[in-house]
Amino acid sequence: MELLTPGIGLIFWMTIIFIIVLLILGKWGWPVLIIGIKKREEDIRNSLQAAKNAQEEMKQLKLDNEQLLLEAKKERDQLLKDAKQVKEKIIEDAKQQATLESDKIIREARENIQAEKRQAVEDLKKQVSLFSIEIAEKILKQELSDKQRSEQIISQEMQNINFK
């Protein structure tokens, strides 16, 4: 039962030791603990601020990435539009060039046909004139006074003429 009811001497010495421990802790222990706690508190505050800053940077990077993505899409769309316009222009130019070439070929063919036609007419005229001269020679060789005979010779020669 002595443990339940301590003596005055025990309480006195326990109080003295408690006060000495309290003074020693107050002088050397608590300031170190308080400094450590304050440092820890400051580190936590700095870490929270850094996390908040990092979160803000992430938001800004996300916005920047979205902006870059939109710009890239716009640029891609513009490049596709430009490529389509270039393609259409090339096709149109090719059509125009083909039309010009075909017109030129047709014009040259017509000119060649006209030239060949003129040449054929000239050749025909030459042949007709040669045949006329031959007929005239033959008529002159025959009797010139007999008209019936001359007409007979002319019609006979006309049947013999073979246009080449």
Image (tube, rainbow, N blue to C red):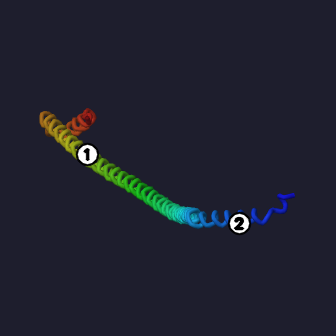
Which of the pair 86/9 is nearer the observer? 9
| Residue displayed at 67% across by 63% down | 17
Q: What label does residue 91 carry, if any?
A: none
Q: Position of residue 98 (x, y in %)?
A: 35, 50
Asked if 106 appears above or below 26 in the picture, the reply is above
Q: How many neighbours does mark 1 have within 10 angstroms: few (below 14), some (14-19), or many (20 or more)? A: few
Name the amino acid type tagged 2.
Answer: Thr
Provide the secondary structure element on which disc 2 rests: helix
Q: Position of residue 66 (x, y in %)?
A: 51, 61
| Residue displayed at 84% across by 58% down | 2
Provide the secondary structure element on which disc 1 rests: helix
Q: Earlier in the sequence, mark 1 or mark 2?
A: 2
The residue indicated by pointer 1 is: 112
Asked if 75 appears above or below 108 in the picture, the reply is below
| Residue displayed at 26% across by 34% down | 162
The residue indicated by pointer 2 is: 15
Q: How far, Cα to Cα, is label 1 from label 2?
A: 137 Å
Name the amino acid type tagged 1.
Answer: Asn
